Image (tube, rainbow, N blue to C red):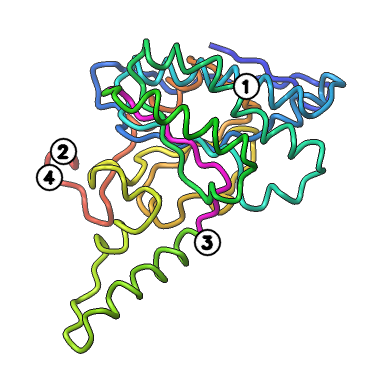
Amino acid sequence: MLRFFPQKDKYIKEAAEHEFDPSLPIPQHIAIIMDGNGRWAQNRRLPRVAGHKEGMETVKKITKHASHLGVKVLTLYAFSTENWKRPNEEVDFLMQLPVDFFDTFVPELIKENVQVKVMGFTDSLPAHTQEAVKRAIDQTKDNTGMILNFALNYGSRAEILTAVQALYEELSAYGEALPELTEDMLGTHLMTGFLPNALRDPELVIRTSGEERISNFLLWQIAYSELFFTKALWPDFDSALLEDAIGSFQQRNRRFGGLKTKEEEE
């Protein structure tokens, strides 16, 4: 299947090269760096905020499809701690977006049995954004299906530093009888600590727009994640491309630093 994506007023072809097999394992936790909203709008000579609005429609479609495929956790990088550097008009729009998004989409999420979670330094968000977030979390708290986890005002270095500080204060209470520090102890203090242990680390990380970097996203959690980069701008990312990314994941041999088994070598 060929997909067409506008870029700088030209169209480039991108083939869905990886065959998706619903009978093979599906990544239980998928994380996505949703990049390219602004470029999508600029390619159409629209204001950047139009790209963010269209990007939210893509969130709805991908959320539903991921849930239907059996994904347990979908983490979306919505707003980073560095995004405050953008123009005030764009930041104001992005802070209003969760309000409009949740008010219209929560009924569908309830119908889909999807639970909303938000991680990040949410105390620094505007009051109306915080209220929308808390409302969506409360309205979907009884849902038992996929967790839709938004990283909002999130930065991984700040997350790790905050976790280490909290852990240091906690361990200081032990005095001389200091217990041995473990990865699980730190993991519990990270912002993904609310998830079951087996689901805290994404198995698959997707980044749209052709950029191939992590951008301060889940640096601890993605130590052994499979990475998938696509040239598609986020508003153009669709169910077929999600399946393409999963198809790529299904073809990889995940050894976690070990060696192939005899069966794999044969």
Judge whether 33 appears above or below 71 on screen: below
Res. 100 mark: 1
Q: CA distance from mark 1 to mark 2?
A: 54 Å
User: Looking at the rendering, in which quadrant would you find the C terminus?
Assistant: top left
Q: Which residues are magenta?
A: 145-157
Q: Are marks 1 and 4 in contact (CB under 8 Å)?
A: no
Helix or strand or loop: what does disc 4 sit on? helix
Dot 2 or dot 3, earlier in sequence: 3
Write down the residue under mark 2: 266
Q: Mark number for residue 31?
A: none
Rendered residue at 75%/51% (across/down): 85
- Residue at screen point 39% across, 19% down: 19
* Mark 4 neighbour density, 10 Å: few (under 14) some (14–19) many (20 or more): few
**Cβ–Cβ under 8 Å for marks 1 and 2:** no
Mark 1, residues whose alpha carbon is within 10 Å: few (<14), some, or many (≥20)?
A: some
Q: Amino acid at mark 3?
A: Ala
How far is mark 1 from mark 4, CA to CA? 54 Å
Q: Earlier in the sequence, mark 1 or mark 4?
A: 1
Q: Which residue is mark 4?
A: 262
Q: CA distance from mark 2 to mark 4?
A: 6 Å
Q: Point out which mark residue 158 bears.
A: 3
Mark 3–mark 4 Cα distance, whole angstroms, equals: 42 Å
Predominant secondary structure, magenta span: strand
Question: Most extreme residue toward the left, as rendered?
Answer: 262
Instruction: Kindly indicate whether the residue at mark 3 contacts the one at mark 2 (C-beta within 8 angstroms).
Output: no
Q: Nearer the viewer, residue 32 or 52?
A: 52
Q: Are marks 2 and 4 in contact (CB under 8 Å)?
A: yes
Helix, strand or loop under label 2? loop
